[in-house]
Image: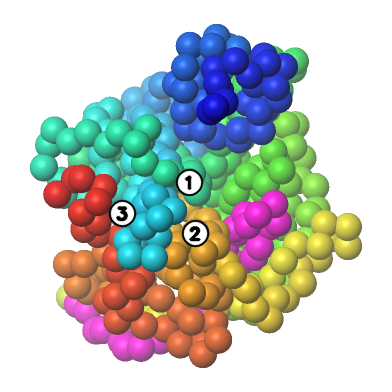
Amino acid sequence: MAADWSQLPKDLLKLISKKLDSEFYQLRFRSVCSSWRSSIAPKNHNHHLNLPSKFQFPSESNNSNNNASTFPLSKRTIFLVTPSPSQLQTLNPWLIKIGPDSRGCSCLWNPLSHDKQLPIRSPQLIDFNQLSVLVLGQEFVIGDFHSESYNSISMKKVVVCDTLLNGNHGSILLTIHISGKLAVFRSGDEQWTIIPEMPTPYSDVCVFNGRPIAVDSTGRTVAVGQDLSLDLVAEAVFGGDTKILVESDGELLLVVKYLSCVTQQTCDYDADGIYQVGLYSVARFVVFRLDEKEKKWVELTNLGDKVLFLGKDCAFSVSASDLCMQKGNYVIFLNDVDRNIFLTGLGINVFCMDKCQDSPLFNFPCWSKLFWPPPEWVGLR
């Protein structure tokens, strides 16, 4: 006789619900049946707790400009939609980012881009109750991509950390100001606060173990406190051109990207002169793991089963087995050079750590099928 899952003890249901670290998983939990839904109260997953509905871009001026443009904060979620276990050998999974645009309409997005919507006939319905879904990460974006006043260089990646502020539930927003300094907005604040301390410009931010984390261009990594203090997380790792933080199965990784100049373009500057613009491609990646006790980065010689995805405003890790791939040790990244030169395609490249080799996504059919168009079994075509 089959077990009656609706009769599970409430204490057990509460214990299960505490293990669900995503609002999506908790929503699915509450949708199983009425007894499961009533066993736990719906949680407020509004990441705008005590925050304004719109934000100005951070400014080093202490005075708030009432005439400055403001932009909404949007949250998007990155999903890996997988076929049933019996079909894993024949059907490929689908990697997609879903979230609102600046008008509040739900859209499909290139998982590694913050401003590239994917075309789809509407209306369409994705019934996640009928699909196996993994939540891989979240992305927060401040901006109105249809507005002429939006300037993408004014705002970099934004992360949101839920915490207790003065005994109340609130949120901390962390980003990097155009100057390279850290900018923080806490629940109850009226404007962004620029943290003046900056030995070198900051390169990336993330949330790890419930704390907002930032890394500068040398690899020196700090945690931002509620009082805007900076606590050392790891000493510097010199070398490379860009530092990127990635959380992977409870560990914090540092990805160091090395670039090489592939071409020079000469452009007219004004009547008196010209300037040259260099186009760069990825030469290699080096990955480090955080040793929290020693406060240092330890180089990894192999990623094992892991595949790292590096996007414009997000970075996440997935096991090769979840992707239905035979092996890991790859870095999938958004190639800004190809994306700027070629107006078609997703602008994504695949870097094989074993061979230290970088290739366009279309050279790997197995990887290409992860992105777009969606597989037929999802039912969107």
Decide: few, some or many residues near mark 2? Use Cα within 10 Å; few <14, some 14-19, many ≥20.
Answer: some
Return the x and y of residue 26 as percentages of the image width and height: 53, 27
Give the spatial CA distance, label 1 vs label 2: 9 Å
User: Badges 3 and 2: C-beta atoms under 8 Å apart?
Assistant: no
**Residue span colored magenta:** 242-269
Q: What residue is disc 2 on?
A: 322
Return the x and y of residue 298 as percentages of the image width and height: 77, 72
User: Badges 1 and 2: C-beta atoms under 8 Å apart?
Assistant: yes
Q: What residue is disc 3 on?
A: 110
Badge 2 element: loop
Task: Say if the magenta span includes residue 261.
Answer: yes
From the viewer's perspective, tell me whether residue 201 is left or right of residue 130: right
Task: Say if the magenta span includes residue 357.
Answer: no
Identify residue type, mark 2: Asp
From the viewer's perspective, tell me whether residue 181 is left or right of residue 163: left
N-terminal of the two: label 3 or label 2? 3
Give the spatial CA distance, label 3 vs label 2: 19 Å
Where 255 sits versus 153, above or below?
Answer: below
Q: In the rendered image, which quarter contains the N terminus? A: top right
Residue drawn at (75%, 62%) of the image:
290
From the viewer's perspective, tell me whether residue 363 is left or right of residue 50: left
